[in-house]
Amino acid sequence: MPAQRIERLRRFLPVATLAVLVLIVGALQPEFLNPDTLLDLASDTAVLFVLASGVSFVILTGGIDLSIQAMASLASVIVALTVDRLGYASFVAAVAAGALSGWLGGLAHVRLKIPSFVATLAVGGVLAGTALVVSHQHSITLGATQRAYIGWITGPWLGIPREVIIGALLLFFADTVQRRTPFGRYIAAIGAGEAAAYASGVKVGRQKVVAFVISGAFAAFAGVMLAGRLASGSPTLANEQLLPAIAAVVVGGTAITGGVGSIWRTLVGALIISVVRTGMTFIGVDIFAQEILFGAVLVFAVAVTIDRSKIPVVK
Amino acid sequence: MRARAGAAASLGRLRVIDWAPLLVLVLLCGIIAAINPRFLLFGNFVRIAQAAMIPLVLAIGETFIILMGSIDLSIEGVVALGAVLTSLLVKNGANAHDLGVAGVGLVVLTGGLVGLVNGVVHVRLRIPSFMVTLGTWFIAAGIANAALGGIAVRINDPIVRGLVLQRVLGFPWGVWLALGTLALGWFIQDHTRPGRYLYALGGGEELAALSGIPAARVRILAFTLAGAFYALGGVLSGAQLGLGNAQVGQGRLFTAITAVVVGGTALSGGEGGVLQTLVGVLIVTVLANGMVLMGVSPSIQTAVQGLMIIVAVSLSIDRKRLRIVK
Amino acid sequence: MNGAALPVLALRHVGKRFPGVQALRDVTMELRPGEVVGLVGENGAGKSTLMRILAGVYQPDDGEILLSGRPIRLAGAADAMRHGIGMVFQEQSLLLNLSVGENIYLGNEAAFTRYGRIEWHALYAAAARQLAKVEVGVDARTRTADLDFATRQMVELAKALTLEEAASGHLVILLDEPTSVLEQTEINILFARVRALKSRAAFIFVSHRLDEVLALSDRVYVMKDGAVVAELPAAGADVRHLHSLMVGRDLRAEYYRESLQRPPRTDVVLAAESLGRAGAYRDVSFALHAGEVLGIAGVIGSGREEVTRTIAGFLPHDAGRLTVFGQERRFSSPAEAVDCGIGYLPRERRTEGLVLFLSVAANITLASLGRLRRHFLLDPAAEARVARDWVARLGVRTPGIDAICLNLSGGNQQKVVLAKWLNARAKILILDHPTRGLDVGAKEEVYELIRSVTGEGIAVLLTSDTMEETIGLSHRIIVMRDGVVTHRADAPPGGKPTQLDLIEHMV
C-alpha cells in the first residue's frame, strides 16, 4: 500500500526532522538549547506560524493563497495609520480587511472559476498597490503614544513571550475548527475528493470561500503582530514571507494537492523553518543563501508529500 | 443537431474574444489622446516602446508556458540573476571581467539552465509548475543576492549600455532587440513542431500523447526557452538601469502575467500566442503611460493590473468545461 | 483458420486487470486480411478495453498479440500506428484548438518539416487529400472547434487513413462506435469507404447498433463479462440471435430477489412533467412512487444519463416541471437535491461516490454532519456511534470505522455510499449503475439492500449497465432513445417484460 506508506512518511518525517535539526544545532551551539533561547525561537516563529496556519486552510482544500504577504503588509499599514484614531479597534479593522480581501479573492476563484493561484496573485497585486498608495510608499514608525496600544503583542507575560501565547491561542482555535466543526470536515473532504464532496451535497463553493476568508484574516493578524513587534507599518513589511509560509505548511507534511494535513503539522513545519534559519545564522550562512535553501527545501518537500494520483496531467 | 448548435455558439464567442484586446488597446489610446494630446507625440511613443521592451521579452517567454496550461513564477528571480550576472561579466565597476557580447550570451545560457531545471523537476518529479517555479524564483533571487551581497554594480560595457542609449530610427537598440525576440517567438510558435506542440499540450495533453507527441520533452524545452528569454530581459533591465542589483526583477512577474492574459492567451492553455501578448504588453504599458500623463500615482498600477488579471481571466475561461477548479 | 491466409492480427489468451476488476479474460480472436470483424457486447463487456489494447493505449497483463504471425508489444498509440494499427476513437480524440490539417498529421509533421520549419502548404495539401478520401468538404485550415460532431468523426477517420501512406503492408483500423453521432448519409459514406479499403486494410468494428454490425461485418465476435462468448459469420445471423448471445445467462428470477418485490405505495414522491434540457432530452414525463423501483433503459446517448443527473442536481432542466414531494423544484447543485431528500449513488463510485482518502465514518456522515453538531462542535462519540450502527446494519466489511475507504472492496464501498444516504434520511435514491465493477456476490448483496430499502418506502430511480438488471429490479421501466421516452412497461414479479420487448424501442 504505497498510499499508506506515503501517509506514514508525511506524518512522522517532519517531527523526526525537527528533532534531528534541534539536536544538530544544539550540538553546534549548546546555548541554543537553553529554555530562554528556545522561547525566543518560539516567539520568532509565531508570525510565520500564524501566516502559515491561515494558508493551510486553503491548501487543505487543494487551492493556494499567494496574497498573504501583501495582506500582512497592508494590515501593518492599516494599524500604523489608524491606531491613533481607532485605538484597539484598528487591530479589528485590519483583521476585518483581511477577511474582506479573502472573501473577495475566494469569490473571484469560486464564482469566476479562476484558478486560485492566479486569483490570489491578482488580489495580492491589488493589496500591494493599495498599501503603497495609502502609505505614500513610506514606512510608518509608531510614536510613543501609539506604542501603548501594541503592548499586548510583545514582551513576556508570566515569563512567556506574548507572541507564543497568541500563537497557542490561534493554534487551539484552528485545531478546533479543523477537527471539530462541519466546516473542517468539509474542507478536508473537498481536498481529498472534491467531486465526491460536491455529489454528497457539500456546498463546495461556500466552504472554499470561508477557507480564503480565514486565510486572509490570519494573514492580516500576522501583519498586526509584525507591526507590533517592529513598532512600524510598511507596504513591504511582510515581503519575503510568502515562501517560508508555504514552505512551512508543506514541510510539515500537508500535501499541496489537499485533503491531508492539520494545524499541528503546520506548527512542526514552521518550527523546522525557524530552526533551520537560526541554525544557519549560527553557522554563519549568509541570509541570501538561506533563501536559496528555502526554495530548494520547498520543491523537495512538495515532491515528497504530493499525491500524484490526484493529478492525472501535471500542469 | 445539438452538437452543431453548440459549435456555432462557441464560434461566435471566440470571435469576439479574439478581437477584444486589440479593441481595448485602440479605445485606450483614443481616450488617453483625447484627455492629453501629448500622448500622440513621437517622443511619447518612444517612451512607451522603451517601457514595453522588457515586459515584452519576459511575456513572450511566459506565453510559451501559459500556452501549455502551465505557469512560470520564476521570472523575477531569473531577471535579477540575469541583471546581476550581466553586471559581473561585462565591463563593470566591480571586477576586471570584460566579456562583452559573449558575457551576454553566457547570461542567456544561464537563464536557459534555470529554465531547464524548472522543466526537468516539473516533468520528472511530476510537481505542478507553479510550485517548482515558486521555488526556483527564490533560488535564483537568492543566488543573485548572494553574488552581490546587497550592493549594486555599475555596468560600463558600451554595447550593453548602448541597448538603451543608442538609437536607430529614433528607437533604442533594446526595442529592436525585443521586436527581434518577438519575431523569433512567433517563428517558433507558428512554424516549428515544438511550437505547435505547445498548442497541442494546452488543448489536451492526454489526447496529444495519444498522437505520439513527446510531452515531457516539449515541456522541458519550453521552460528552457522561457528561462533564456527571462535572462535576456535581465540583460535589458541591467542596461536600462546602468547597473546590476538583485532588486531589478521586482514587479516583473506581475506585469508579464497581466500582459499575457490581457492579450487573450487563455490560462487553461491552447489559445493565444505571442502576437496577442504584444497587444497585452501594449495595453499594460499604454495604461501606465496614460496614468502618468493624467497625473495618477504610479503606485496604484499594481492594483490596476491585479484587477485586469481577474477581468481578463474571467472573460477567457470556458466555465462550462470546468467544474473543479483548484 | 481453415488454411486461409495468415491472420493480419491475432490475439492469444489476452487478459487485462484493473484494480478490483478483471476487464478481459482469455480473449482469443483473429482478423484476416481484408476482413471486417464486428465486435458486440453490452456495456462493460470489455470491448473498449480490448480496442485500447490493440491501439497501444493499454498493455495486456496476459497473453500475446501477433501481427502477421509475429508477436509484438505495442508501447503506445504512436507505436501502434508505426505498426499499421490506427484507431477511430469513440470519444473524440481531436484537439479542438488546432486546425483540421494539424490534427490529421499531429505527431507526424516530420514529413513536412525542412530545416526545422514546417511547410504548411505541403501539410495542408496532404490533409486536403485525406479529407477528400472521406468526402469531407471542409478546408483543412478550419479550426476543429468550428466543426460539428459528425464532421469531426469523419476527420477522425481521415486521420486514421493517413496510415495508408505512412505504414507499409496490410493495415488494421479499429472503429470504436464511429456511427453514434453520424446521420444516415454520413454512415453510408463511412461504410462505402470501409468497403473500398478492404484491399488495403482489415477492420474491427464496434457498435451498439447491431443491424449496422451485421450489415458491414464479415464475422462477428460476441463479448460478455470480459470474455469472448461466441464467434459467428454475419451472413445468416440476425439481431435477435446476436442479442441473446450478448445477454447469455438465462434469467433466474430469484437472482434479483423478485419474491421480495412489493407493490409500491400510491403516493407520488417525485414527478417529471415534459421535462427537457436542450441538447440532452425533451418531453420526459414519469412519476416515482414511494417504495418503487423505476428503471430507465436506453443506450449511450439516449438521454437517460442526463435525466438521472438532472434529478441528482448536476444538470438543471430548462423545460417542463420537476416536482419533489409536492414542491416544484429546479436544482442548480447537488446540495439542493440533497436538501430535498434525494441521494445519488453515482456511477463513478471512486471519484463521486466516496472521498476515498477519508475514513468510513467520515464518509457515512458527510451528507448529514449538521445533525452531529452540539454547541457548534461535532460530537465524535455520536459520530462513531452512528457509523458503527450503519456498518453493522449493512454488513460493511471493514477493519474499523476509521479505516480509509480506499482499501475497501467495491461492494463494501458501495455499502458505505448507501449508508451515507440512509443516514442523511434520503427518501429518493438515484442508483446510477449501482453494480458496476462488482463481483457476483457483491451484486446480490446490493440487490438485497435495494429490496430492503424500498420495502421501507424509499423510492429508487435506477439506471444500469445491463437490461437484465434493470428488468429484474424494477417495478416499472421507461425506455429512452434519442432524448425522448419511447416506451413504458410494467415489470411486476412473474410478469417481467423480456429484453427483446424493450430493445426494439432502444435502437
Image: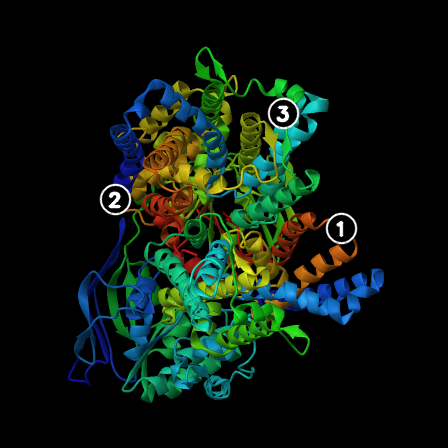
| Residue in view at x 70 percent, y 51 percent | B298
Q: Is residue B51 above or below residue C404?
A: below
Residue C332's x, y, as percent? 60, 44
- Looking at the rendered structure, the kind of residue marked 1 is Val
Count residues near mark 1 (Cα–Cα under 10 Å), then give few for <14, some for 14-19, many for 20+.
Answer: few
Instruction: Give the numbered dot on residue B296.
Output: 1
- Quadrant containing the N terminus of chain B is bottom right
User: What kind of element bears circle 1?
Assistant: loop
Answer few, some or many: residues within 10 Å of disc 3's Cα (few below 14, many 20 plus, some between 14 and 19).
many
Instruction: Name the colouring of the figure.
Output: rainbow
Label 3: chain letter: A
Of discs 2 and 3, which sits in the foreground? Answer: 3
Residue B154 at what x, y percent from top left? 52, 59
- In terms of image quadrants, where is residue A14? top left
**Residue nearest the observer in this picture, C177 or A159:** A159
Q: Nearer the viewer, mark 1 or mark 2?
A: 1
Name the residue beneath numbered marker 2.
A2
Amino acid at the residue labelled 3: Phe
Q: Secondary structure at mark 3?
A: helix
A265 is higher (above) or lower (below) than C186: above
Q: Is residue C1 left or right of residue A229?
A: left
Between residues C62 and A61, which one lies in front from this camera angle? A61
Q: Is residue A308 above or below residue C391?
A: below
Chain ID of residue with mark 2:
A
Q: Alpha-carbon distance for marks 3 and 1?
A: 30 Å
Mark yes or no: residue B9 visible: no
The amino acid pointed to by label 2 is Pro
